[in-house]
């Protein structure tokens, strides 16, 4: 069964297992207490820890061992098969829930050359170092022919404040198939809630939020965490008029969002391309909505002078 499943399902199943393993590595680093923080140098709140580095090695090595013909791009740099990785970081079991699903016809035969996996081994690193652990996610996004069509979001510290044993949770999605690992929920009908960055706001980010006239603005960490809020009905839209997010921040979240009929574009309303040779920054900002929202109507509220701050 595992061998005969289509490539896209096997990849997604491996991504789910590897993201979960990476989550346990992230928790081990925190438990040991030596985070090994490095400033990445592109401005404030851009950090890397031992958890980011180790989680990336786990995910990339696991994927490349089984799928050497697929392109894998990770936030923390070079991904190649010759990297030495502790053997118990390499997952060999593929998530059975994903594997046993019915593959949508459009993904039954996909050429490995048309696939890019975008890995953010730890999204929400600042929050991780500050103890806001439920903002942390592991993101493995699946792009086919440049489109974000699926992915995995693992949340290692899900409900860690209320659960004694914290095993986290692993959510996945594929366009045409749907989602697994959680129960999607619709947002409230009587108010309009927007989520955005808590650490990377500036004048343009805030002015763009003002024109949307939200009843509530939830400022939380992580791109994965914010899209989770859309998937679980805690917010209607995620808006970030800034070039700070990269392709690895949005590929998996967009894949899950699209699997449920939502949309993620730039602030002009155009889709991002996730092919292997694109530039990493999402230079025209983030505008994501759940399927309960009219995406274009909201985009139309942003004045042209703000949109002009994000030229192509
Ligand atoms: P945030 O919504 O601020 O938590 O950011 C979501 C993701 O985008 C995180 O991975 C951040 O590290 C990244 N990000 C957003 N803005 C910036 C920025 N100005 N510099 C570096 N990374 C950023
Ligand atoms: Mg990130
Ligand atoms: Mg990261």
Image (cartoon, rainbow, N blue to C red):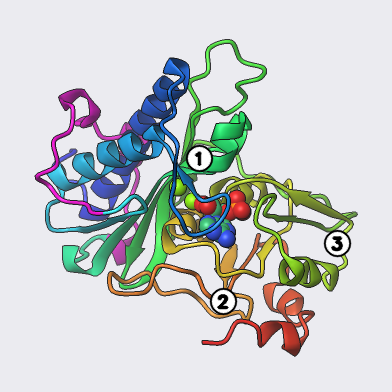
- Determine crowd level at label 2: few under 14, some 14-19, many 20+ residues with C-alpha closer than 10 A: many
**Contact, mark 1 vs mark 3 (Cβ under 8 Å):** no
> Which span of residues is magenta-colored?
78-107
Element type where label 2 sits in the image: loop
Give whichever of 225, 14 is nearer the camera.
Answer: 225
Residue 7: x and y in percent read 21, 53
Residue 303: tell me if it is visible.
yes
Q: In the picture shown, does residue 311 fall above or below 169? A: below
Instruction: Determine if the C-beta at disc 3 is less than 8 A from ligand 1.
Output: no
Which residue is nearer to you in this view: 136 or 62?
136
Frontmost of labels 3 and 2 is 2
* Dominant secondary structure (helix, strand or loop) of the stretch shown in magenta: loop
Disc 3 to disc 2, C-alpha distance: 21 Å
Kindly identify which residue carries mark 1. 137
Q: Is residue 18 left or right of residue 71?
A: right
Q: Tell me where residue 21 appears, x and y as whole percent.
A: 34, 29
Identified at 12% across, 58% down, the residue is 69
Q: Nearer the viewer, residue 121 or 3?
A: 121
Quadrant of the rendering where the N terminus is positioned: top left
Q: Is residue 85 magenta?
A: yes
* Residue at horizontal 20 percent and vertical 41 percent from the top: 61
Residue 309 in the figure: left or right of residue 188: left
Residue drawn where x is 34% and y is 36% of the image: 55
Residue 284 got which mark?
Answer: 2
On the image, the x and y values in percent for residue 233 come to: 71, 47
Check disc 3 and report the residue beneath it: 214
Residue 89: x and y in percent read 24, 28
Of the numbered discs 3 and 2, the one sitting upstream in the chain is: 3
Q: Is residue 241 above or below residue 156?
A: below
Residue at the extreme top of the image, as rendered: 164
């Amino acid at each position: 069964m595992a061998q005969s499943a289509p490539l896209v399902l096997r990849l997604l199943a491996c991504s789910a297992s590897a993201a979960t393993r990476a989550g346990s590595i992230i928790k081990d680093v925190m438990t040991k207490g030596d985070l090994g923080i490095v400033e990445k140098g592109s401005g404030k709140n851009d950090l890397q820890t031992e958890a980011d580095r180790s989680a990336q090695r786990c995910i990339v090595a696991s994927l490349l061992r089984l799928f050497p013909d697929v392109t894998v791009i990770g936030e923390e740099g070079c991904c190649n098969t010759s990297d030495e990785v502790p053997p118990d970081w390499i997952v060999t079991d593929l998530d059975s829930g994903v594997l046993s699903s019915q593959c949508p016809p459009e993904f039954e035969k996909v050429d490995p050359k048309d696939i890019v996996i975008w890995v953010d081994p730890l999204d929400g690193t600042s929050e991780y170092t500050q103890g806001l652990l439920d903002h942390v996610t592991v993101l493995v996004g699946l792009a086919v022919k440049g489109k974000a069509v699926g992915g995995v979001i693992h949340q290692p510290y899900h409900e860690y404040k209320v659960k004694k044993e914290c095993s986290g949770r692993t959510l996945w999605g594929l366009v045409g198939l749907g989602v697994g690992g959680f129960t999607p929920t619709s947002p409230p009908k009587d108010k309009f809630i927007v989520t955005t960055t808590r650490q990377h706001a500036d004048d343009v980010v805030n002015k763009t939020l003002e024109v949307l006239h939200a009843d509530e603005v939830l400022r939380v960490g992580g791109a994965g965490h914010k899209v989770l809020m859309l998937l679980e009905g805690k917010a209607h839209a995620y808006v970030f008029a800034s070039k700070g997010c990269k392709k690895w921040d949005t590929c998996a979240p967009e894949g899950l969002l699209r699997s449920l009929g939502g949309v993620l574009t730039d602030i002009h309303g155009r889709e991002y391309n996730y092919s292997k040779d694109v530039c990493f920054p999402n230079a025209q900002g983030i505008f994501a909505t759940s399927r309960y929202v009219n995406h274009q109507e909201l985009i139309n509220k942003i004045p042209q002078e703000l949109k002009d701050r994000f030229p192509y």
